[in-house]
Each structure stands twice: as structure tokens, then as C-alpha cells.
Amino acid sequence: MNLELSKVVNGLKSVADFQFEVTLTDEFLKEINAIDASQFSIQGTVKKVERQLMLSFEYKGIISFECHRCLAEVKLNLSSCVTRELFETLDREDGDEFVILDNGSVDLTPILEEDILLNLPLQILCDEDCKGICPQCGINLNEGNCTCDDQKIDPRLEALKNLFT
Ligand SMILES: [Zn+2]
Ligand SMILES: [Zn+2]
């Protein structure tokens, strides 16, 4: 999603307001192991302060994941504020902090995706107490119990037992 900023860059305007619906890229959804995502609505401004361009925006949207333990679908409501300083040329070593303007416009999607990535929880769970899936029979332990635990015999022990009988 390109935000046209040439008027601000050229000093014809000091502030540019914007509001967009942004579609996250498939590559990004794959990178974060998401199943699906809503459009993200973003709203913000770019202000020219002396020679600097300051970008700030708020965003919100929903991304669906699989619970790390039980694979049930988990919908995360994500919202945050982003502030970045924009530069017209890349003359900094630590390029991560800055965004290059190409022909007076800036692509907001990678900025949004970077911030979403930073805000994702380390472990995505349907519930903090999710019991997960039984590794033996595959039953979702949130929905019912199985008897695998009672019968569980370590296969190595099983082999030993056979040796001595
Ligand atoms: Zn779960
Ligand atoms: Zn089981």
C-alpha cells in the first residue's frame, strides 16, 4: 500500500493525513504461520518537521492462527501505534529503523507487517490452560479425556521387558 507523499516531501504541505485498508501479503502470513487475516485498517499522518518526515499511524485488524498446542483456530485482535522517521535516501547503517522514500511515496505494508511481528505473542494459545492434543491418540484433551496416560509404556522398557520374559 503506497502512500503518496511528494507534496510533503516538496514542502507544498506540512501534514498529510491518510486512512487505508491494507491487505497483508501472503509471504508475511506464511512467515508468521497465520491461517488467514482480515484487512487491516490504518489511519495516521506524515508530518514534516524541519527536514525530517515523521510517520505515525494506528492500525487494527484480526489474524487467525492455529493454537500451538491443540491446533484450534485462534483469532487475535491486533492493534497498535507505529512511529517511524522517513528518509529520502538510505544513508544510515541501521536501515531497520528507517524507511526509504521511493519517488516520493512510501510502502506502508512492510512497516505494518514489521510492527505486527513485534507485537505477536511468543506462543499463540486458544487458552492459557489449553491441554493440547494427546500425542498418542490425537484426541483434543480440551474436549475429552483419553486413557493413553494409564496405558503408556515406554517402548524401550517394553523391549527390555520382553528380554526378561
Ligand atoms: Zn489450544
Ligand atoms: Zn490419548
Image (cartoon, rainbow, N blue to C red):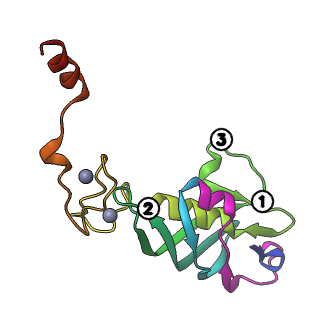
- Marks 1 and 3, the one that precedes in the sequence: 1
Q: Quadrant of residue 45?
A: bottom right
Of 23 and 3, which appears nearest the observer? 23
Q: Quadrant of residue 94?
A: top right
Q: Amino acid at mark 3?
A: Glu
Q: Which residue is mark 2?
A: 120
Q: Image quadrant for the N terminus? A: bottom right
Q: Image quadrant for the C terminus? A: top left
Question: Any mark on residue 88, and which?
Answer: 1
Region rendered in magenta: 9-30
The x and y percentages for residue 79 are 46, 76
Question: Any mark on residue 3, and which?
Answer: none
Q: Is residue 12 magenta?
A: yes
Q: Amino acid at mark 1?
A: Glu
Q: Is residue 87 above or below residue 154?
A: below
Residue drawn 20% across the image and 57% down it:
146
Q: Which residue is mark 3?
A: 93
Q: Report the Cα–Cα distance between label 1 and label 3.
A: 14 Å
Left or right of residue 36: residue 162: left
- Marks 3 and 2, the one that precedes in the sequence: 3
Residue drawn 49% across the image and 71% down it:
64
